[in-house]
Structures are given as structure tokens and as C-alpha cells.
């Protein structure tokens, strides 16, 4: 009976260790995706600023249209970040 108990304990330990490793790997992958999405959003912010600044300097659109271009650039960046993070 003692031999059977040891086998059960070893089996449970192996299963627990396997699950622990799987959860750790998933957390690391998720963290990497979050960081990549964050980097994308930060790059997008600067790109949106540049878009608006170029629009204002060139004076080819109204201020409202320049703001809309900036908003659209940021929205596109947010969507890219979502695609990275959730897919």
C-alpha cells in the first residue's frame, strides 16, 4: 500500500510541475505581447504628433482637419496594438 501511495504522490507532483511550467510560459508570452503593444502605442503617439505638426506647417488643411488626421493616426495605432496584444 505504501508503494501505491508513493506512486500517487509522484504522479501528482509531476502533474503540478507540468501545469506550473505551462502557466509560467503563458504569462511570459502574454507579457511580451503587452510590451510589444505598449511600444506600438508609444511609437504611434510620436507619429501622430509628427502628422499634425507637418499638417500645420504645410498649411494645406484646416486646424480641424489636422486634428482629425492626428486622431486617425492614433486610432490606427491603437488597433495595431490590439491586434498584437489579443491575437
Image (cartoon, rainbow, N blue to C red):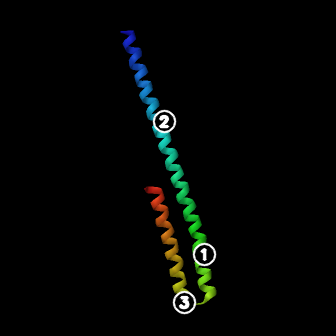
SS at badge 1 = helix
In three-dimensional space, the C-alpha distance between marks 1 and 2, rounded to whole angstroms, equals: 43 Å
Residue 63 occupies quadrant: bottom right
Q: For the point 47% across and 30% down, which residue is it? A: 17
Q: In which quarter of the image is residue 66?
A: bottom right
SS assignment at label 2: helix
Name the residue at 51% across, 53% down: 33
Near mark 2 (Cα within 10 A), the count class, few <14, some 14-19 or many ≥20, is few
Judging from the image, what secondary structure is the residue with disc 3 in?
A: loop
* C-alpha separation, residue under disc 3 versus residue under disc 1: 16 Å
Q: How crowded is mark 1: few (under 14 residues within 10 Å), some or many (20 or more)?
A: some
In the rendered image, residue 42, in percent from the top left (x then y), is placed at 58, 65
Residue bearing mark 2: 21
Q: Residues within 10 Å of mark 3 (few under 14, many from 20)?
A: few
Q: Do the residues labelled 1 and 2 touch (CB within 8 Å)?
A: no
In primary-sequence order, the first of circles 3 and 2 is 2
Q: Which residue carries the number 1 mark?
A: 49
- The residue shown at (45%, 61%) is 83
The numbered disc on residue 62 is: 3
Rendering coords of residue 59 (x, y %)? 60, 90
Amino acid at each position: 500500500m505504501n508503494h501505491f501511495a508513493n506512486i500517487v504522490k509522484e504522479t501528482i507532483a509531476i502533474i503540478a510541475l507540468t501545469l506550473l511550467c505551462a502557466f509560467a510560459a503563458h504569462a511570459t508570452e502574454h507579457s511580451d505581447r503587452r510590451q510589444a503593444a505598449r511600444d506600438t502605442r508609444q511609437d504611434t503617439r510620436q507619429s501622430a504628433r509628427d502628422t499634425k505638426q507637418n499638417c500645420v506647417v504645410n498649411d494645406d488643411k484646416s486646424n480641424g482637419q489636422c486634428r482629425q488626421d492626428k486622431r486617425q493616426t492614433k486610432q490606427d495605432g491603437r488597433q495595431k496594438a490590439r491586434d498584437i496584444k489579443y491575437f
